[in-house]
Image (cartoon, helix red, strand yellow):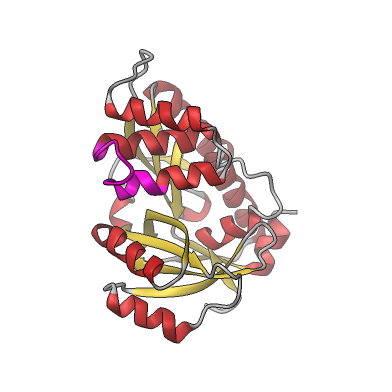
Amino acid sequence: MAGHSKWANIKRQKARVDAKRGSTFTRLSRAIIVAARTGLPDPAGNFQLRAAIDKARAAGVPNENIERAIAKGAGTWTDGNTLEEIRYEGYGPGGVAILIEAMTDNRNRTAGDIRAAFNKYGGNLGETGCVGWMFTQKGVVTVCRPDGKAIDEEQLLEACVEANADTYELVTLGEDGNIPGAEVYTTVANLNDLSQVLTAQGYRIDSAEARWFPNNTVEVTDASQARSLLRLMDALDALDDVQSLTANFEMDEELVSLSTV
């Protein structure tokens, strides 16, 4: 919808003017642990791990932290803390559905932090499954050209067909939002193949991840509701235990600007 933004776009825009609280070393290290635990602890044979390592390095995570995270995922390093993945679901102001994936070594702490954020900004933490059916998980590969020039859509479309991608969306990347790029969507199982095809076609891979998408969206038009909702999303996104966050709302870009002043 022209002039409207979903949460993924709003988050990208806000990251250019706010401190990037979501990309903490803790969160990036935990993503490496998950990848190493669910596959081979070798990035050469584990695409998810390789992508997590690349993202951590781009954010400045030291190699020592990365190696320790891989070892923890592989089970060769232990500090007495066992991490587990948990999904939380709830409703924001106006009944907006919110889906949260977290990794924690303390369920009580994480649930308490998430519940406190919901309560503070007019939302409600619900039971598992209360909103999960409203979302579908997809694979997303974010790319740009190494020379920073605009994406050739015809060439990108050919790559998408070759790699069995579903569709794509042009986006802007970089801290100043001045790098033209694209998000290419596929199944989670096809992430590795898609990334390889796009790399072979000369694109630079900015990120490759599994991401939840709402099946339908709710338009937020009330300024007060928009302000509370964005503050809730920011509060949840700032928690170290939160690995991913999505919601099923859209709002006018002017309303986003007014609500984040």
What is the magenta range?
38-51
Quadrant in the picture for the C terminus: bottom right
Q: Is residue 111 visible?
A: no
Q: Is residue 90 magenta?
A: no
| View extreme (right): residue | 261
Count of labels shown?
0
Left or right of 123, for residue 216: left
Residue 232 point in image, percent of width and height: 56, 44
Residue drawn at point x = 63 percent, y = 52 percent? 15
| View extreme (bottom): residue | 154
User: In the picture, residue 128 is in which quadrant?
Assistant: top left
Residue 28 point in image, percent of width and height: 47, 38
Q: Is residue 192 visible?
A: yes
Left or right of 80, for residue 173: right
Residue 32 point in image, percent of width and height: 39, 37
User: In the picture, residue 68 is in which quadrant?
Assistant: top left
Residue 213 point in image, percent of width and height: 38, 60
Residue drawn at point x = 69 percent, y = 48 percent? 18
Of residues 144 and 250, the one drawn nearer to the viewer in this rendering: 144
Q: Is residue 46 magenta?
A: yes
| View extreme (top): residue | 80
Q: Is residue 76 above or below residue 223?
A: above
Of residues 145 and 236, the one drawn nearer to the viewer in this rendering: 145
Residue drawn at point x = 36 percent, y = 77 percent? 159
Left or right of 83, for residue 122: right
